[in-house]
Amino acid sequence: MHNVSLGRALYTVIIGPAGSGKTTLTAALGRWIEENQGFRVSYVNLDPGADQLPFKADVDVRDWVTVQRLMRERGLGPNGALIACMEEVYARRSEVLARISKLPAEFVLIDTPGQMELFLFHDAGPAVSRELKKLGSACAVMLFDSSLARVPSHFATLNLMGVVARLQLEIPVVIALNKGDLANAPRAGTWARNPNILLNELRKEPGVISELAGRLVEILNEFNLAVRIPIISSLTQQGFGELYDLIHEIWCACGDLT
Ligand SMILES: Nc1nc2c(ncn2[C@@H]2O[C@H](COP(=O)(O)OP(=O)(O)OP(=O)(O)O)[C@@H](O)[C@H]2O)c(=O)[nH]1
Ligand SMILES: [Mg+2]
């Protein structure tokens, strides 16, 4: 149990590719934190394309703009409309952030659109994360489907994605592999716990990409940029304790214990 209040909120942005389970995790992790850590949790939806949500959004970007409305009004396709939505969110970010800043919670979980690249490489995502950092502590959870980590070189490149996200959003990034209940990446847990086993298996994998991935792991280790990657399940709550500890460590490192 870490139910010690750090005096200021922790804003956790959940990012990841389409369908990796961001929305399910936002709801499940929020409930888990409320029940197991005793903190108040607020929920923010920054996905203007969301239909139904499994959590009650305390701040909802759809109050300002929706993908459906811009598709209708501007004759755009879903991707064009999402880009237009992010422009709208960017233009109105001070209103959105003012609402977020008033949430009476220690933990604020923020769900984002499926097109992760839009949040990372459009102005709106980095602008939001920079402002969140000013409000309290902030971090991102970068979620991947664990089926992406079936071979050592794929697993090794996840850390690199985390570095890219950290560079873009300017906040610490925790990487997690979701859908661990499906056991479709049986070695991932071993690689996550033991980088030496990962390096050994990379050396056995043929090809220049595996060699590159091995060097990458070594360099990231050297620069202390490799992170622990928990295997989690938003359905069974597997790995939530480990994920929470990683997030909590960031909270402790960013703020003074009170
Ligand atoms: N087996 C399993 N399925 C999961 C898990 N988490 C999410 N899912 C399923 O994955 C699908 C996508 O989940 P979402 O939470 O909508 O994913 P998302 O990343 O928010 O999707 P977009 O917002 O559309 O990008 C749903 O069918 C979920 O039920 C998990 O831990 N295990
Ligand atoms: Mg979603």
Image (tube, grey):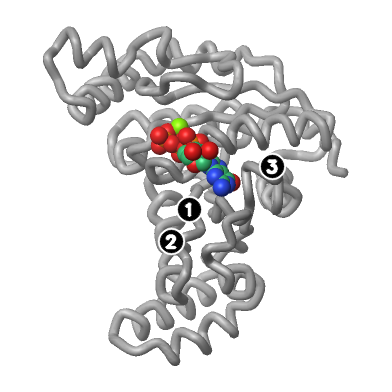
Ligand 2 falls in quadrant: top left
The tag earlier along the polypeptide, 1 or 3, is 1
Q: What percent of the width, then of the height, locates residue 234?
A: 62, 43
Secondary structure category for the residue under label 2: helix
Residue 251's disc number? 3
- Seen at 70% across and 25% down, the residue is 41
Quarter occupied by the N terminus = top right
Q: Residues within 10 Å of mark 1 (few under 14, many from 20)?
A: many
Classify mark 1: helix, strand or loop.
Answer: strand
| Amino acid beneath label 1 | Asp
Q: Residue tagged by mark 1?
A: 145
Q: Residues within 10 Å of mark 3 (few under 14, many from 20)?
A: many
Pointer 2 residue Cβ closer than 8 Å to ligand 1 = no
Residue type, label 2: Leu
Assign the C terminus to one quadrant of the image: top right
Disc 1: residue Cβ within 8 A of ligand 1's nearest atom: yes
Left or right side of 160 for 200: right
Is residue 14 in view? Answer: no
Q: Mark 1, mark 3: which one is toward the viewer?
A: 1
Q: Secondary structure at mark 3?
A: helix
**Residue that carries the numbered disc 2 in the rendered image:** 148
The answer to whether residue 203 is seen in the rendering is: yes
Q: Judge by depth and name the residue closer to the eye, 119 or 133.
A: 119
Q: Position of residue 46 (x, y in %)?
A: 44, 24
Identity of the residue drawn at 42% across and 41% down: 19
Count of numbered badges drawn on the protein = 3
Q: CA distance from mark 1 to mark 3?
A: 25 Å
Q: Mark 1 touching mark 2, by CB under 8 A?
A: yes
Q: Is residue 55 above or below residue 144?
A: above
Please say if 224 is above or below 55.
below
**217 and 222: which one is in front?**
217
For marks 1 and 2, give the CA distance.
6 Å
